[in-house]
Amino acid sequence: MNIPADLMRMIELFQLPFMQRAIMGGILTGLMGGMLGSFTILRQLSFFSDALGHSALLGISISLLLRLDPSWVILPFAVLFALGVTYFMERTQLWTDALLNIIYSSSLAIGIIILSFRDDYRGGINNILFGDILGIRESDLILSGLLLLICIAFIALTLRSQMLLTLNEPLAIARGVAVTPHRTVFIVLLSLLVGISIRAIGVLLISAFVVIPACAARLLTRNFIGYIIVSSALGGFSAVLGMMLSALLNLPSGPSIVTMQLAIFLLAILIPNLKLLVS
């Protein structure tokens, strides 16, 4: 491999508008994924984000069958689906993991069946499953930026309540924290993050995109606020590294980002001294 030539090609690529949009989109969604993921894993909602990501295929399939723009269908679908799943989780006596398994498996199956009626879209199934960050548009960046600001505002304004709900829910209830509204808003934000990130990361990889940076940050930090910050930073940083890897080696962007997240996670395990740098 001719490294200087490859580096020059990568530099040239990053000067193109679509690559700049891809980088910006990766950073925005990476920051959001790390921020919300830090609460997701501590609240044991990792499988929920996985179920939501897989089920998003159903919303995409419906929009394609109706010949609508998936970008405008997937967000309300994700919110309604998340609220519906939350309702069933609270109303049934089934184990959470079993119920989520039923929901996301059946949604994935129905979505694929619906896609089979669109002969002209079968070739694009890989973009749905594994993402295509190069297809990010300016409208997607605007939505991602607005959602990031909303997430930051929500976490900043309710940080104490979110910490109590995450670390000790009975204590939060005893101190008068409105559990249901806080939980519902968080679920809605998580579902919107999944809906926005589907285009870039794909249905099959969205859960890893949310969970891995938060797990790496959990290994590196002891302070809760530091944990949120490091998780967000790792999400954005891994997105940039993944895009560089994708451009340099001509690899799929979504899998490249998740692979870089995995590399960071393994470093957090294998190099304990890193904890001293961020504790």
Image (cartoon, rainbow, N blue to C red):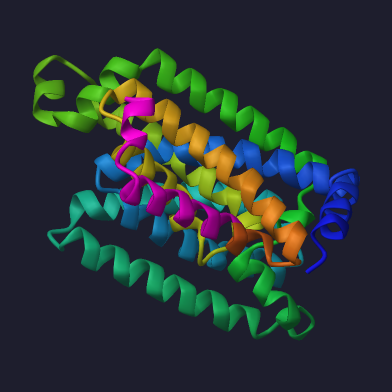
Q: Is residue 85 above or below residue 105?
A: above
Q: Nearer the viewer, residue 43 or 259?
A: 259
For image coordinates 36% across by 45% down, the residue present is 268
Residue 166 coordinates in the image, percent (x, y): 23, 32
Prevalent SS, magenta region: helix
Report if residue 68 is visible in the image: no
223 inside magenta stretch: no
On the image, which quarter does residue 60 sit in?
A: bottom right
Q: How many labels, in total?
A: 0
For image coordinates 70% across by 67% down, the residue present is 251
For image coordinates 20% across by 23% down, the residue present is 164
Q: Tell me: 264 left or right of 244.
A: left
Q: Nearer the viewer, residue 184 or 221?
A: 221
Residue 207 coordinates in the image, percent (x, y): 44, 56
Question: Can you say which quadrant of the picture contains the N terminus?
Answer: bottom right
Region rendered in magenta: 257-279
On the image, which quarter does residue 118 sit in?
A: bottom right
For image coordinates 64% across by 38% down, the residue present is 27
276 inside magenta stretch: yes
Residue 237 coordinates in the image, percent (x, y): 58, 39
Question: Can you say which quadrant of the picture contains the C terminus?
Answer: top left
Q: Nearer the viewer, residue 207 or 243?
A: 243
Q: Tell me: 40 left or right of 222.
A: right
Residue 96 coordinates in the image, percent (x, y): 21, 59
Report if residue 173 is visible in the image: yes
Q: Tell me: 173 left or right of 230.
A: left
